Amino acid sequence: MVSLSGKVHTLIAGEKLVIPKGVPHRWWNHSLSEVAEMKVIFEPALNTETFLEQFYGLSNDDKTKKDGSPHFLQLMTWVNEYQVFIQGPPLQLQVLMGYILGGIGRLLGFKNIILNTASSYNQPRIVAGVTSVLAI
C-alpha cells in the first residue's frame, strides 16, 4: 500500500505508481503474514541506497522500536544527511529540527552512518506488517 498526498493506493502485481519529487508519501505492507515485494527506482538516487541500508540494517539488527521505526534522535541525525522528511510538519521546521536535534543525537552517540549496521544489511524485515513508514 502507498499513501500519496493523503490518498491510499493499493497496488497489485504489475502496477506502477510514480511519486513526484517532494510529494509526501509512505509505503507499507498491511499483511502480518504475507511478504510484499516491490521495485522502487529513485531518480536521481543520490545517497538513497546508503539511507536504506542504514534504516533496514537497524531493523535487521533489532535496533528499532516495536513498529520497526528507529529512535527519534536517530531519525533526526539522518534528516539533513539523507534529505529524508516525514509527512506533516513544514519542511523548513524539519530541516531546523534536523540540525538542532540531530546535533543532540550525535552528542548522545547516534550516527549518520553506522558502519557495522550497513554491512549487516540483507533485506527488509517485516515488523508487525510494516516495512517502512517514512516519507522518502
Image (cartoon, rainbow, N blue to C red):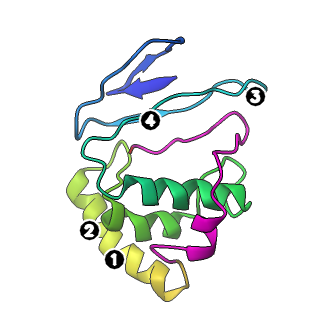
Judged left or right of residue 30, residue 114 is left
Is the Cβ of the residue at disc 2 closer than 8 Å to that at disc 1?
Answer: yes
Q: Main secondary structure of the magenta part?
A: loop
Circle 3 or circle 2, nearest the eye: 3
Task: For label 3, count other residues whose C-alpha is less than 10 Å away and answer few (under 14), some (14-19) or many (20+).
Answer: few
Give how far apart the Cα atoms at labels 3 and 2 are.
Answer: 36 Å
Badge 4: residue crowd in 10 Å (few <14, some 14–19, many ≥20): some
Residue 11 position (above or below residue 93) = above
Residue 53's spot in the image, x, y percent?
53, 57
Residue 38 lies left or right of residue 20; in this view the side is: right
Residue drawn at x 53%, y 11% as measured from the top left: 12
In the image, the segment drawn in magenta is 111-135
Q: Reading the chain from its start, which is encountered first: label 3 or label 2?
A: 3
Q: Residues within 10 Å of mark 2 (few under 14, many from 20)?
A: some
What whole-number distance in Å separates the C-alpha atoms at marks 4 and 2?
22 Å
- Going from the N terminus, do you reach mark 4 or mark 3 first? 4
Identify residue for label 2.
96
Give the residue displayed 37% in from the left and 34% down from the top: 25
Decide if residue 54 is on the left or right side of residue 121: left
Q: Gap between marks 4 and 3, in whole Å?
A: 18 Å
Q: Secondary structure at mark 2?
A: helix
Residue identifier under label 3: 32
The residue that appears at 52% across and 41% down in the rendered structure is 133
